[in-house]
Amino acid sequence: MADVELIGIEKRFEERAVVAHVSLTVADGEFIAILGPSGCGKSTLLRMIAGLEHPTSGTISICGRDATRLHPKDRNIAMVFQNYALYPHLTLFENIAFPLRVNGVPKRVADEAVRAVAEIVSIGPLLSRKPRQVSGGERQRAALARALVRKPDLFLLDEPLSNLDAKLRQSAREELKLLQKKTGLTALYVTHDQVEAMGLGDRIVVMNEGVIRQIGTPEEIYRYPADTFVATFIGTPPMNIVEADDGLIGFRPETIVPGGPEIFGSQSFPVEVVRIEYLGNVQLIYATALAPFKPVRVIASIPAQSPSGVREGDRTHFQVPLPELRFFDKATGLAKATAVGDAAIAGAKSHG
């Protein structure tokens, strides 16, 4: 088991900082999802923890030991990549056993370990097959088993589900979370997929342009975004942001009541409905905000079986309960403290 502490980690390539002043503490047994768009520095950060890259400055501590310059083999870390890197000429059994064979583990002990870990990831009956003879999901499980068989202190995963189709990703996500809970491993999981991050992470680290923008539980990240980047990166559809004279106001699409009589305790936003989209479980109402707000697209999400009472071309209003409003500074994009969510916002800004 492992706890991890990153202090002031920076990685520069010539004059460009791809990771800048990252500090993060990961508790023993915690599952951390590192989320961000392509090129935000999340994979570089993971590679530095693994020892595949060295930070330009800063300190990496694993299990209370300074690991900043340790060789990867001395860190007792297992890493699973998007490409599972299984040897095609070996059976799944021999693929899983490979790290034990390399380290000179006696054959009987290694064979028992392989069978035990194969049962944990539910591929016991497939061990005699080669990678080309099993599905993508089964290859992914074999790669996880190969990582687990070494009994690592720390488990690093770099977009390991990206090669699976949507249905397989959902089931693999569930299995991965159950596996981590069963083994008690400390895990850091890099992804650009917010659904994976929300579904897997005990906490989520949101990164952009090499910087941590927010750290928090999935609920904190979603309900109390630390800035407008997080607000609009998390959520499908993302948080609506409208501009008033004194700042920015944010609200989630599902908190909107379209049209109807004025609701006490709500903020009303005048809009013109542009398009209504039916998606089976929900309807999305696309509209344009009207004066006194700057014209910008806003989206309402309502249950498909609930008639909205509005049609394309209508001039109406979207109503949002006051506790669901979030306020952001116009110049910096940072969240402003409000009576609702002060503690969550303050915790988010502390970066863990």
Image (cartoon, rainbow, N blue to C red):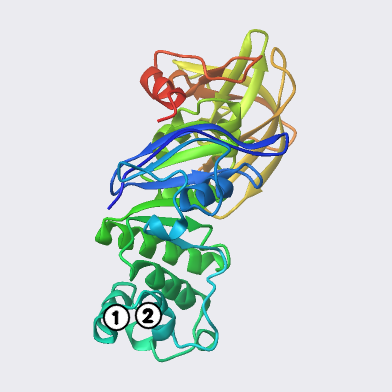
Q: Is residue 308 visible?
A: no
Q: Nearer the viewer, residue 264 or 244?
A: 244
The answer to whether 177 appears left or right of 7 in the picture is left
Q: Does dot 2 land on a helix, a strand or a loop?
A: helix
Seen in the picture, residue 262 relative to 124 is either above or below; the reply is above
Please count the marks in the image: 2
Q: Does dot 1 land on a helix, a strand or a loop?
A: helix
Q: Position of residue 16 (x, y in %)?
A: 71, 36
Quadrant containing the C terminus is top left
Q: Position of residue 293 (x, y in %)?
A: 69, 16
> How far separated are the C-alphas under marks 2 and 1?
7 Å
* Residue 129: mark: none
Q: Mark 2 or mark 1: which is in front?
A: 2
Seen in the picture, residue 75 relative to 314 is either above or below; the reply is below
Which residue is denoted by mark 1 in the rendering? 110
In terms of image quadrants, where is residue 61?
Answer: top left
Residue displayed at 75% across by 22% down: 295
Q: Nearer the viewer, residue 202 or 341?
A: 202
Closer to the N terminus: mark 2 or mark 1?
2
Which residue is denoted by mark 2 in the rendering? 101
Is label 2 in contact with label 1 (beta carbons under 8 Å)?
Answer: yes
Q: Position of residue 158 (x, y in %)?
A: 52, 57
Q: Is residue 4 visible?
A: yes
Q: Inspect the image, locate mark 1, and give the three-letter code of the amino acid beneath it.
A: Ala
